[in-house]
Image (spheres, grey):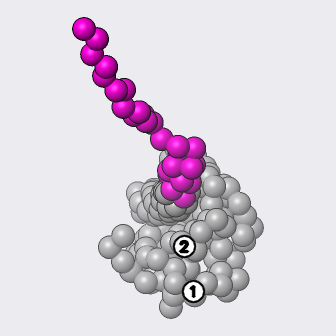
Amino acid sequence: MKCSIAKSKQTAGFTLFELLAGLGIVGILGAIAFGSFLGIVERGRVNEAANVLRGLIQTSQREAIKKSRDCIINLPPKQTRNPVISSNCAVTGDRQLRNVAIQYNQTNQIHINHQGRFKQRRTIVIYSNNTDYKRCLVVSNFIGMTRTGRYTDSNVATVSADFCQTTNT
């Protein structure tokens, strides 16, 4: 006795159109995520450079007080990419701020007297050309304090402490 069993036609897998649509969606999401990732990386570079600069200023200030002598911090020319900053009081030598640019007001030297006070009020902006994110440092001339913040002016050609907004980030 023969039993005839009808084979049902089953399809397994995806059609070419479904695969292309899925790959297109994954590509779009990947591009969005990659752009956000690059922004986070650039922001991290700017933050790191601002912290290195602030550390050099504070170290030079402490050394000026400790050794009872005046110190000078030399800044590179304005809008220099990958700037190198030096100080005659830096214990560990020059500092290079990688993948960022620097802009500041006044001259390219920061003078610190033997009491740790700055000769003049200064505003320094660290930024990346790839993003709008900018960090700033303001050094007070009388009491010798520094503060950091986010620089809110889109134009860095003229730097002002008025645009250095203190934030928690």
The residue identified by callout 2 is 134
Residue in the picture at 39% in, 34% down: 10
Identify the magenta region.
Answer: 1-28
Q: Position of residue 139 (x, y in %)?
A: 48, 77
Nearer-the-camera pick, 106 or 3: 3
Residue in the picture at 64% in, 65% down: 130
The crowding category of the residue bearing disc 2, from other C-alpha atoms within 10 Å (few below 14, some 14 to 19, many at least 20), is many
Task: Please give the label number shown on residue 153.
Answer: 1
Secondary structure beneath dot 1 equals loop
For this orientation, the residue located farthest to the bottom is 162
Nearer-the-camera pick, 117 or 96: 96
Separation of disc 1 and disc 2 at Cα?
9 Å
Say if the magenta span includes residue 71.
no
N-terminal of the two: label 1 or label 2?
A: 2
Q: Position of residue 148 (x, y in %)?
A: 43, 73
Quadrant assignment, res 104: bottom right
Residue 107 sits above or below residue 158 on the image? above
Q: Amino acid at mark 2?
A: Lys
The reply to whether residue 139 is in sight is no
Q: Quadrant of the N terminus?
A: top left
Residue in the picture at 27% in, 16% down: 3
Question: Does residue 145 appear to the left or right of 20 in the view shown?
Answer: left
Nearer-the-camera pick, 96 or 59: 96
The reply to whether residue 169 is in sight is yes
